[in-house]
Amino acid sequence: MAKQTKISLIIFYFLLCFQSKGLPFDEKGWKSEKSTHFIVYYKEADGKFVRQSVDKAEEYYKSIAENLGFTRYDFWLWDKRAKIYIYNDAVDYRKATGKPSWSGGAAYYHEKVIETYPWAQGFFHSLLPHELGHIIFREFVGSENNAPVWLDEGVAMYQEKLKRFNLKTKLLQALEQGKLMPLNKLSELNIAFVNDKEIVELYYLEALSAVDYLLNKFGRDNFVELCRLLKERKTFDQSINGAYRVFKNLEDLNKAWLRYIKE
Ligand SMILES: [Zn+2]
């Protein structure tokens, strides 16, 4: 994928983060394939793609819940299942959703709905795990939470295995060039309004790295506790201190995370 497209995709994910469709999603005229946590709707899409979507979605559901430590919370059964709509092709998708076809898909977190079309570029390895990461995280922390956006994005990025490639090198390079932003800067930034692509890309990579640090250095139990405290609307400083006694606040986390990058 060209760099330009990759950055556009990253931005695209973000722009959809707080979006809600407003209209109910239709089931009429769609065929469906059901699994434990998902219902996949399609019309003329290739059966192989439909099957693969069901399998991949279940596979990611399991791995995301596992890597975040949310396995005890099985929130999506039966009528709460997430829905994936597969349009016939890129033209059909674009016509029905008004989205550019290069996006490969769109997600509506509130409705737990993902839309795509067969063999859209990046759907299985990028968009699907990223968006499921958001949906699962938000299901856990609830709609009235105090989680910073970078944590939400970091969790979503963490699900895209390819994004971890060369992560350390890129961050060290940014650090050397004096471009690396401290975590409190990430909390202050309203990334939806940032036009500088370099800053946007760095924001996502740093968010990913911070989540990677928390999960890999301290494990899942502390991370679940952090999310639980944010769900209870404790401030970030209170939550990070409550879940990880070694950090008094975000600044402490930032210092430790910087050391981790340099390791
Ligand atoms: Zn995202």
Image: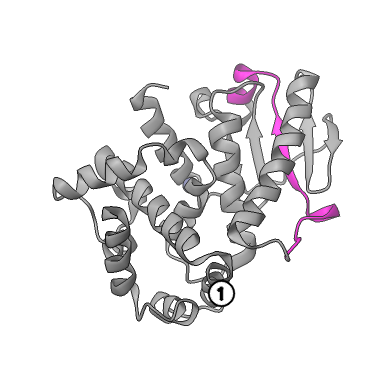
Residue 169: name its quadrant. Answer: top left
Q: Determine whether the residue tagged by mark 1 lies in a helix, strand or loop.
A: helix
Q: Residue furthest front?
A: 263
**Label 1 packing within 10 angstroms: few (<14), some (14-19), many (20+):** some
Measured as percent of width and height from the top left, residue 178 is found at 14, 50
- Which quarter of the figure has residue 8? top left
Magenta stretch contains residue 255: no
The quadrant the N terminus occupies is top left
Q: Which residues are magenta?
A: 73-95
Q: Position of residue 15 (x, y in %)?
A: 45, 44
Q: Residue at x 67, y 21 (%)?
A: 118
Q: Who's the residue at 70% across and 49% down the image?
A: 62
- Total tally of numbered discs in the picture: 1
Q: Is residue 110 visible?
A: no
Work out whether residue 127 or residue 17 is closer to the camera in this orientation and state it: 127
The response on whether ligand 1 sits within 8 Å of label 1 is no
Can residue 62 be seen here? The reply is yes
For the C terminus, the image quarter is: bottom left
Question: Where is residue 230 drawn, in percent x and y?
Answer: 51, 73
Q: Is residue 165 or residue 91 the one in the foreground?
A: 165
Horizontal and vertical percent position of residue 11:
40, 39
